Image: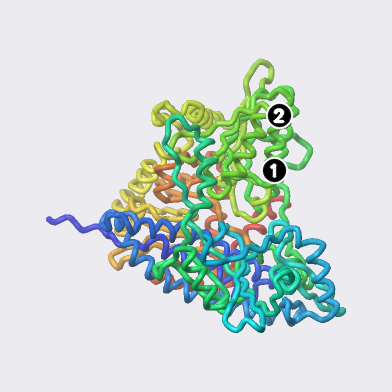
Amino acid sequence: MAKKKMIKKFIPRDISWLSFNGRVLQEAADNTVPLSERIKFLGIFSNNMDEFFRVRVAGLKRALAFNQKEAKEIFYETPQSILDELYERIIKQQDKFDETWREVQVEMAKQKVYIKSFADLNPQQQRFVKHYYEDEVESNVIPLMLDDMRPIPYLRDKSLYLGIAMRKRDWEYETKYALIEVPTQGNGRFILLPAPKGEKHVILLEDIIKFNLPYIFSFFGFDTFEAHAFKITKDAEFDIDNDINTTLVEKITKGVKNRRKGKPTRFVFDKEMDSSLVEFLIKKLNLSKKDSIIPGQKIHNFKHFMDFPKVFKTEEKAKERIPFYHPDFDGKQRISDVLIKKDVLLSFPYHSFVPMIDLLRESAMDPDVKSIHIAIYRMAENSKIANALVNAARNGKEVVVMLELRARFDEEHNLDWKERFEMEGITVLLGIPDKKVHAKLCIIKKRIENKTVQYGFVSTGNINEKTAKFYGDYCLMTSNRTIMADINKVFAALKKPKVDLALTLANCKNLMVCPTSMRNAIVAYIDKEIAEAKAGKKAHIIVKINSLSDKHLIRKLYEAALVGVKVELIVRGIYCAVNDKKFKQPLKAISIVDEYLEHARVMYFYAAGKEHVYISSADWMPRNLDHRIEAAVRIINKKIKTELIDMLHIQLKDNVKARILNNELDNAYVESGKKDIRSQVELHRYLKGKTL
């Protein structure tokens, strides 16, 4: 009998990612969302799109030079066909963005909040803008003259520029061009203007510069100025030098510097810009018709609108948006004393992040604590976590920090922390060659009555007090001996990067670790569910992740669906699987996009009634499973396991912010005739109920 042909159809990850960004745009377009949040979602959409062009579009363009058969295997379709579909979808999304922004401005006007252009200022505002430029902006403005004889000055990715065309009335045919980088880092993007009572007037920094162009270029005698905004997006990847005599730090430093030389992948400009200046810039940037040359509206670098000033009528923070302390941390006991007695699961951003900081602060001052080992990926700007670690080192503790220098776009930030940590006597580990360390782990050792006691945590998200306020994540705080033993093995591997990983990480009992054991362990769990379904028994899998793109695991889910395993998926972003008519039990897949960023990874397997649950740092993507150090911890505590299962079911019932992930990627909302269930609100109520 011929073997059944396995399903091979997948959605290309980049097409799927655009669908995710479409869900972000849906939030901006939703008039039930508070106005300040709608503006923030427009900023998030724009920022996401910038990074998409820096990384994914740039990668697809690089892949055009590959063998197309090999490229199709990697990208699921040929790079050119994906790029063609991407551009078509991007144009539609940009039109929707522009329409939404117009609607938002109408709503702003109802609250008497207006964004004023340089041409709309009254005399009082004109005086204010002139003085503001002289006092606050002028020292940060560097006009750059352009001509055919010189190469274009270096233009920075992520920056906003004004392209300026200048003329004199008696020069009928000649136009001079100049560039000004808008100094948003030094001055911010938004300035509040003097305004009539009851109104709020906001001007963008580029309009302040536009107003002052006659002053800026007064030496040249120009009397006509046209200035329009533009930006470029560059390839953000950098090649790491393989010279064996070069340290990783030197390679990363060099790579960050070389990133500025990245080829532009997108040129976005105000469609009203002088056409000759547009042609001049395209020529000087070495762009072609194959590149993304996008005429747009007046405002660019919309990512800054994530920080739009608080000018709206007071929007009271809903009680479901106020974090609270976990009931096990009532302030009467030290964090370490609680953990030695019991496991605690923190659910961010509903629970306060403070116990994480307090754990390290206590350890820094506790005379019985001998060492702290922690793996960090991204830290807050003024990190209290980092300061606690420095304090511990100053108090004579052995502090070992695994700091991932290759965390994309945080390389310079982490290099700075590495230098500071080492100056304080902290040992900084740089991980395994060719593998990012994405696991979030901590182990603290102390001596009590001649015995070593160990406790710490395993987290799904960054050890970052800023993002913990709006990222949905889980952190298991524990002193479980087998979990501590497994974490020790991970740090042993990180300390000896040349030793075989599989050998060092062998026999981990409660941690699945990438790249050695997690993939095989997940496959084994799915196979057991398949066997149960074939035997006519209950079989159930629930997976909550950010991204699902790994072909091998997707095929295993197809295999499970074919025989009737109930597979439920909560995937925030990339989703490359499809449903097939042959499935006995179709995949149920949803995506929740709401005020908080869904970031936690959870795996549930019915396991013949044993119900195994893991929280993890890893998404189901090849880069996570095969090219990173990741960790998933099995939840042993029955109460916490029940809690996690309950929270998964709350999210699966969401019919307000959940969208169906189907083959068409049309982002249809989950509909139900029952009462509205907004899972982020319900999770807050569920967890808050445990404190009463």
Task: Inspect the image, locate mark 2, and give the three-letter code of the amino acid beneath it.
Answer: Ala
**Residue 538 coordinates in the image, percent (x, y):** 38, 53
Which mark is on residue 383? Answer: 1
Residue drawn at x 50%, y 38% as measured from the top left = 251
Q: Can residue 45 be seen from the camera position used here?
A: no
Residue drawn at x 41%, y 67% as measured from the top left = 288
Sequence-first tag of 1 and 2? 1
Residue drawn at x 40%, y 60% as measured from the top left = 13
Task: Inspect the image, locate mark 1, and give the three-letter code of the amino acid beneath it.
Answer: Ser
Structural crowding at the residue carrying mark 2, measured as other residues with C-alpha within 10 Å and reported as few (<14), some (14–19) or many (≥20): many
Structural crowding at the residue carrying mark 1, measured as other residues with C-alpha within 10 Å and reported as few (<14), some (14–19) or many (≥20): some
Q: Residue furthest front?
A: 170
Which element type, helix, strand or loop, lies under badge 2? helix
Q: Which residue is mark 2?
A: 392
Viewer-nearest residue: 167 or 235? 167
Which mark is on residue 668? Answer: none
Viewer-nearest residue: 401 or 571? 401
